[in-house]
Image (cartoon, helix red, strand yellow):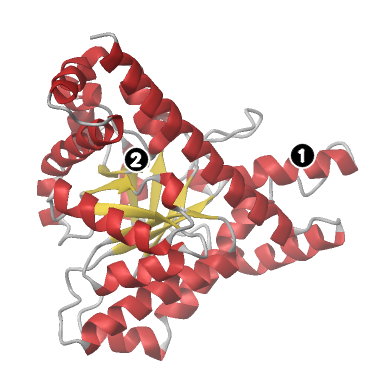
Amino acid sequence: MSSSPLQALSDAGVSIWLDDLSRDRLQSGSLAKLIEDSHVVGVTTNPSIFSAAIGGSDLYRDDILALKAEGLTTTAIVAELTTSDVRNACDLFLPTFLESNQVDGRVSIEVDPDLAYDTSATVERALFLHHVVNRPNVLIKVPATMDGLPAIEELTARGISVNVTLIFSVDRYRAVMDSYLRGLERRLASGQEITSVHSVASFFISRIDADIDKKLDAISESHPLRGKAAIANAGLAFEAYLEVIRSPRWTALKSAGGNMQRPLWASTGVKDKSYSPTRYVIDLVAPGTVNTMPEGTLDAVRSTAEQVPSDAVTGAISQAHEIFTALTVAGIDMRKVVAELEDDGLKKFEDAWVHLLQNVASVAERA
């Protein structure tokens, strides 16, 4: 292997996932090469990724025209295209899935973003996606809205492995973990196995700094707290995770074969180019975590001369508390920040979804 920093990440217990998927990646062999050479053991997708993939490639055109000729609606065509790519990626990752005892080798597909505030519709769509992809290593992405929480519990209770996305606050993350544990407890109480159920909780990173840095810039130039909020927020989330895995509640579920919901660091590409492109990877190394990164970030980590620590997070938890205290003193309202980021994140995914539908409809209409 030539990717020693990536090897060091894996050795530290970090699962490296790629935050991207396209038919071009699948057909060109570039994804297979990343699996072979770069320790990539999973993939995440979202509406923005699929919008860019389908809108920017002619590889989907023939399928769009054929599906249109069959009488499928635009929404149904998009579902066929995205689930097909995810299914093929799942097949590519199947050896990883089996070698990792079903922990990695996972590919995520998201429930339509316009359903984020409808619990029953989210559950119904998640079950549909799980059925259509029909692969054991698929993860169904569900947003961590208040309406998403009972959907996470219900899907877990039904044996569906879930990737919970758009988590910005520690409080919401605690609620997400509770929903997952409730689902496992319900499933166990009904006499069903829980060993096949896995989950990750996608905690968003860079968008925290992007928002809070702007607020700090308005207070003073070169504010000493600039660039510290996101990693500190992740540190407090990891503290909450440690509390759960050390609890009697989790011990009971683990003894019954349960798999703990792993923290996944998402949005790890830097927004501020004055920051190191590896900061949301190197500074968030912790055992038992996942880091899903765009290829640019993956490349930066591969070529970095930085030392990859065995654990950058656990020892920095007390400092994270200090940073959050200082942010409060500086006038940063974290509750308002995370609420706005959740709304903005959902809007961006909804906009990408609408754009995707429009692109597909445009191709079909030109036939």
Q: Check disc 2: other Cα within 10 Å, few if <14, some if 14-19, many if 20+.
A: many
The reply to whether residue 297 is in sight is no
Picture quadrant where residue 151 is located:
bottom left
Q: Amino acid at mark 1?
A: Lys
Q: Residue at x 44, y 26 (%)?
A: 355
Vertical side of 16 occupied by 274: above or below: above
Query: Residue pushed farthest top?
Result: 366
Label disc, if present, on residue 45 of the rendered structure = 2
Label 2–label 1 contact, CB within 8 A: no
Picture quadrant where residue 286 is located:
bottom left
Q: Nearer the viewer, residue 269 or 145?
A: 145
Q: Residue at x 19, y 23 (%)?
A: 68
Q: Check disc 1: other Cα within 10 Å, few if <14, some if 14-19, many if 20+.
A: few
Q: Amino acid at mark 2?
A: Thr
Position of residue 94 measured from the top left corner of the image (x, y, whole percent): 11, 47
Q: Residue at x 21, y 69 (%)?
A: 159
Label disc, if present, on residue 214 of the rendered structure = 1
Picture quadrant where residue 213 is located:
top right
Position of residue 214 measured from the top left corner of the image (x, y, whole percent): 77, 39
Q: Nearer the viewer, residue 338 or 151?
A: 151
Query: Residue pushed farthest right?
Result: 220
* SS label for mark 1: helix
Quadrant in which the N terminus is drawn:
top left
* SS label for mark 2: loop
Vertical side of 309 occupied by 56: above or below: above
The reply to whether residue 156 is in sight is yes
Q: Residue at x 70, y 43 (%)?
A: 211
**For discs 2 and 1, the disc positioned in front in the rendered view:** 2
